[in-house]
């Protein structure tokens, strides 16, 4: 991200009646990024995880990422200013394992937990019973249906998708997903909130993969198939797309970065729903790597070895 983009996201102020108290559920790669950019924009964040150890890890990851952001933002400024930025941002993030007490004054809840519909249903049922009527609900799901997730709540008019991209502090896009029941007021609040945290928002219906993943996942899958046929090596496929198409990462590098388990899970879900769509066929190589625990960057190995 360019310096000006970072600066813009940092200097964005929150409007008078805008969302101020945000609860992020799930402190993984996406959840901690969402918590970070929200706090960077001056909002209060409660980050919910299942246990203290995972919370600590999320807080530490946020600290590292904030350090990288500060290094760029305050490149020509005294170190004390960068330190203040990091500490002020961190101070706006409160960690907890108690989901019920976390949402008592929430304006917005963003769910970024495991991609399992039953677990998401259980969570949103509890949230719906506990959170005040004003609280808007959103899911950061990358492949499940927002309508299906929202179906267990009594606030479908205050429900939508807010889909972020990895790494959240760097990627400027936010996909805002409307289900037929999402009210105009809720949609407007989502769009304004996205802007307030420094993102450019696009709108999409509740269709598998929304915009980005619907195009990106089949592209990554085609790259794997190219490799599986023996047409080109992993390295050459990546070099080709970086230098020939101007992408920041090659497709196999990106699959490792997104997580091979995530890529496999998305394809598996879509294949089950749309078995006649060949682009959604699951991939033998990815399935094998996942079985071996080679999930990409996060596990230290995938198409590439990151342990060296
Ligand atoms: N936090 C803060 N800053 C970060 C960061 C993070 N997590 N990751 C990278 N950066 C910044 C740092 O400022 C870093 O500078 P530093 O070296 O001083 O720390 C700068 O980015 C450059 O990083 P790198 O030198 O490590 O590497 P790159 O120049 O290649 O940039 C990248 C990294 C921004 C990730 C770039 O490669 C990129 O844009 N890749 C494509 C990512 C992409 O397509 N994401 C979408 C995936 S799909 C998705 O998320 C949807 C989901 O549903 C699956």
Image (cartoon, grey):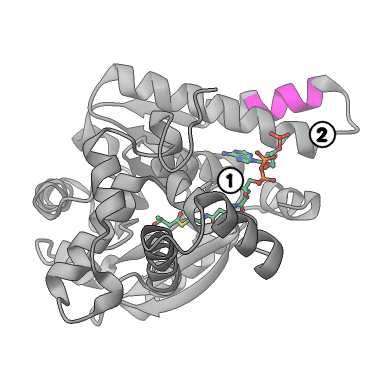
Q: What's the distance in space between the residues labelled 1 and 2, CA to CA?
A: 16 Å
Which quarter of the rendering shows the C terminus?
top right
Q: Does residue 177 belong to the magenta stretch? A: no
The mark that comes first in sequence, 1 or 2, is 2
Above or below residue 249? Residue 75 is: above
Q: Residue at x 17, y 81 (%)?
A: 276
Q: Is most of the magenta stretch helix, strand or loop? A: helix
Let me know if residue 111 appears in the view: no
Q: Residue at x 26, y 71 (%)?
A: 280
> Mark 2 Cα within 10 Å, few/some/many (few <14, many 20+)?
some
Badge 2 element: loop
Task: Name which quarter of the figure residue 299 lies in.
Answer: top left
Label 1 lies in ligand 1 vicinity (Cβ under 8 Å): yes
Q: Residue 251, labelled with which disc?
A: none
Question: What percent of the width, then of the height, locates residue 266?
Answer: 27, 59
Residue identifier under label 2: 74
Above or below residue 28? Residue 237 is: below
Residue identifier under label 1: 169
Q: Does residue 84 belong to the magenta stretch? A: yes
Which residues, given as a range, are shown in magenta?
Answer: 80-86
Question: What percent of the width, then of the height, locates residue 171?
Answer: 58, 54
Q: Is residue 72 left or right of residue 127?
A: right
């Amino acid at each position: 991200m360019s310096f000006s983009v970072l600066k813009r996201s940092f200097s964005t102020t929150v409007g008078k009646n805008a969302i101020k108290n945000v609860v992020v559920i799930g402190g993984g790669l996406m959840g901690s990024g969402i918590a970070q950019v929200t706090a960077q924009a001056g909002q209060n964040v409660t980050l919910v995880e299942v246990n203290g150890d995972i919370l600590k890890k999320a807080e530490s990851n946020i600290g590292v990422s904030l350090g990288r952001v500060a290094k760029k933002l305050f490149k020509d400024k005294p170190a004390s200013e960068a330190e203040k930025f990091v500490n002020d941002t961190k101070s706006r993030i409160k960690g907890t394992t108690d989901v019920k007490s976390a949402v008592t004054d929430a304006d917005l809840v963003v769910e970024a937990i495991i991609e399992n519909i039953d677990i998401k249903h259980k969570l949103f049922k509890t949230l719906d019973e506990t959170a005040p009527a004003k609280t808007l609900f959103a899911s950061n799901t990358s492949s499940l249906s927002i309508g299906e997730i929202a179906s267990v709540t009594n606030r479908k008019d205050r429900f939508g998708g807010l889909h972020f991209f990895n790494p959240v502090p760097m990627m400027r896009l936010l996909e805002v997903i409307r289900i037929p029941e999402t009210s105009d007021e809720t949609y407007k609040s989502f769009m304004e909130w996205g802007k307030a945290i420094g993102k450019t928002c696009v709108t999409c219906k509740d269709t598998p993969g929304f915009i980005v993943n619907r195009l990106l996942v089949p592209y990554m899958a085609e790259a794997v198939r190219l490799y599986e046929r023996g047409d080109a090596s992993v390295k050459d496929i990546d070099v080709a797309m970086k230098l020939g198409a101007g992408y920041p990462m090659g497709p196999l590098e990106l699959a490792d970065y997104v997580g091979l388990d995530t890529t496999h899970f998305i394809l598996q879900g879509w294949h089950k729903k749309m078995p006649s769509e060949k682009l959604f066929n699951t991939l033998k190589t990815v399935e094998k790597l996942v079985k071996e625990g080679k999930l990409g960057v996060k596990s230290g190995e995938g198409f590439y070895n990151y342990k060296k």
